[in-house]
Image: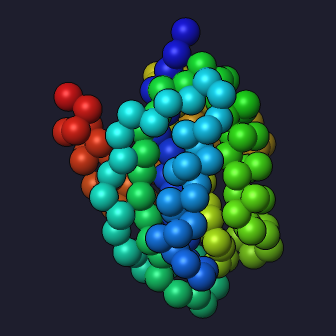
Amino acid sequence: MDDTAFVALGSNIGDREGHLAEARSRIAAIPGVVIMAESSIEETAPLGPVAQGPYLNQMIALVTSLAPTALLDALRTIEAQGGRVRTARWGPRTIDLDIVKYGHTTWNSPELRVPHGEIDNRDFWQRELAELAEVMT
């Protein structure tokens, strides 16, 4: 059975728009994934204690036959292909891909929490989810 997942994209290093576009393209190429809708791209201030430049953020809605952990693995591969290096938590990055929601599923493991633990703390995610809900109805 396929589920609808919402994935947040963010970038604040280099060609931010290019990194988002490349990530969307790679996500669309994952077997068992179809992108259904994309929110607008918006610029936001960085979160966390590390000094860094502003982010471009976007949310996509996709339908997938992948389990949450399999989708996470595919997204982490795309991050690595996009030059993401995991150093400081909430530090700068070429591309960041987060599973924000996954159908009606809740998941809580060391590597993945769904819904995402920061969903209520990120106003831009709330705006992007609302925009996608409007487009998908």
Where does residue 131 sit, x and y in percent of width and height? 24, 47
Please identify the quadrant where the C terminus is shown: top left
Image quadrant holding the N terminus, namely: top right
Coloring applied to the structure: rainbow
Say if 33 sits above or below 48 in the image: above
**Visible in this render: residue 40?**
yes
The residue at 62%/47% (across/down) is 26
- Nearest the camera: 97 or 37? 37
Farthest residue, direction top: 1
Q: Is residue 95 above or below residue 102?
A: below
The image quarter containing residue 124 is bottom left
Give how far across and how far down residue 11 sits, in percent.
55, 70
Residue 106 is situated, as x and y percent measured from the top left of the image, at 56, 27
Q: Above or below — where is 131 with respect to 21?
A: above
Q: Nearer the viewer, residue 70 or 46?
A: 70
Task: Classify residue 136 by image quadrant.
Answer: top left
**Total count of labels:** 0
Taking the spot 52% from the left edge, 87% from the top edge, the residue there is 53
Q: Residue furthest bottom?
A: 51
> Is residue 108 at least partly visible in the picture?
no
Q: Residue at x 74, y 68 (%)?
A: 83
Q: Is residue 109 left or right of residue 5?
A: right
Q: Residue at x 55, y 40 (%)?
A: 28
Q: Quadrant of residue 81?
A: bottom right
